[in-house]
Image: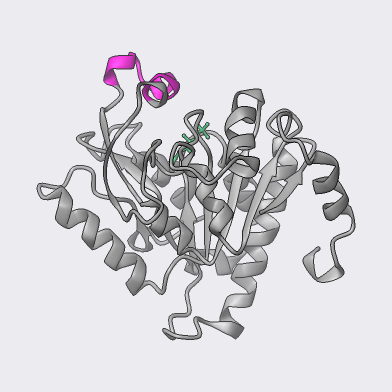
């Protein structure tokens, strides 16, 4: 993993926006080698961490962005799409509207489906049909989850129903009027689905994330910290502020690598 420590969440947003805009600009000339699909496919996360990225992309909007497709990581089960905290609503507000995307190209798992198992399978198929995800944005939970893959998730899991941990429900209670309102279940891309993305950008800010970040980046590969699965990814970058980087041990080395990165990586 490449660890990049930046001074603020604004600079993290800008750094990520640079990577995404470069990818979008390169897409027309490269395309997908195997599938012929040409649209850039962005994997989007909800929660607070990625908001500076969407704000930066909104500020620096270019017409090519309007052509991309997007796939969300997860959704609560049983929350109507119109609920302001359903990820359908959040993605619509924070991503589709800000980036002026075509709503028909923005996909969110269907946590309100009559047949959730079929809906999970359909989501995997839709990602495949779009040519796979070019870049997946991720946050990390205090439990070490990425997407809503809570501890003990299989590294080869695909989109499926999971039960949220009490810790995640407590963390997300800030978005609801009472903790009991936070749904028990979610539909989430699996760790295997996430690992299939061609590039991954994990964003974490604030001291509350320091322990989970250290376990994911420097700890052993373990389903007890699902974020550690990213150690298996060939192109994963972790964007941190100082507080989220505080429990890492190789910080000086990460800074040295970043300061001495070759021209083509800048
Ligand atoms: C959101 C998601 C979660 C969040 C994580 C961190 O779609 O999949 O993994 O990224 O819970 O949330 P924040 O950024 O709100 O701290």
User: Is residue 16 toward the left or the right of residue 160 in the image?
Assistant: right
User: Is residue 252 toward the left or the right of residue 128 in the image?
Assistant: right
Quadrant occupied by the N terminus: bottom right
Q: Quick check: is 151 in the magenta stretch? A: no
Q: Which residue is more in the foreground, 194 or 60?
A: 194
Q: Is residue 121 above or below residue 72?
A: below
* Residue beneath the point at 47% across and 30% down: 143
Question: Residue 191's spot in the image, x, y percent?
Answer: 41, 52
Magenta residue span? 169-181
* Residue beneath the point at 74% across and 29% down: 246
* Residue beneath the point at 57% across and 32% down: 212
Question: Residue 115's spot in the image, x, y percent?
Answer: 11, 50
Question: What is the magenta segment's predominant secondary structure?
Answer: helix
* Residue beneath the point at 51% across and 43% down: 227
Q: Which residue is more in the foreground, 52 or 219?
A: 219
Q: Where is residue 5, by image quadrant? A: top right
Question: Residue 172's spot in the image, x, y percent?
Answer: 41, 25
Q: Quick check: is 179 in the magenta stretch? A: yes
Q: Which residue is more in the foreground, 63 or 116?
A: 116
């Amino acid at each position: 993993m490449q660890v990049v420590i930046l001074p603020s969440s604004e600079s993290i947003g800008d750094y990520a926006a640079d990577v995404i805009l470069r990818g979008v600009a390169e897409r027309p000339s490269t395309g997908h080698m195997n599938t012929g699909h040409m649209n850039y496919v962005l994997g989007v996360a909800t929660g607070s961490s990625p908001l500076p990225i969407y704000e930066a992309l909104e500020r620096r909007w270019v017409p090519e962005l309007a052509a991309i497709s997007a796939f969300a990581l997860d959704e609560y089960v049983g929350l109507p799409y119109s609920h302001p905290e359903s990820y359908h609503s959040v993605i619509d507000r924070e991503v589709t509207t800000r980036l002026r995307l075509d709503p028909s190209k923005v996909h969110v798992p269907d946590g309100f489906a009559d047949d959730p198992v079929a809906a999970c399978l359909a989501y995997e198929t839709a990602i495949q049909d779009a040519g796979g995800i070019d870049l997946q944005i991720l946050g990390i939970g205090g439990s070490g989850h990425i997407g809503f893959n809570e501890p003990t998730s299989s590294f080869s899991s695909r989109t499926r129903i999971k039960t949220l941990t009490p810790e995640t429900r407590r963390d997300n209670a800030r978005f609801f009027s009472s903790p009991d309102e936070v749904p028990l279940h979610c539909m989430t891309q699996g760790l295997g689905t996430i690992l299939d993305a061609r590039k991954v950008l994990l964003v974490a800010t604030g001291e509350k994330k320091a322990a989970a970040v250290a376990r994911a980046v420097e700890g052993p590969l373990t389903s007890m910290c699902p974020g550690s699965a990213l150690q298996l990814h060939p192109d994963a970058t972790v964007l941190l502020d100082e507080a989220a980087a505080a429990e890492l041990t190789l910080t000086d080395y990460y800074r040295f690598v970043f300061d001495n990165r070759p021209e083509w990586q800048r």
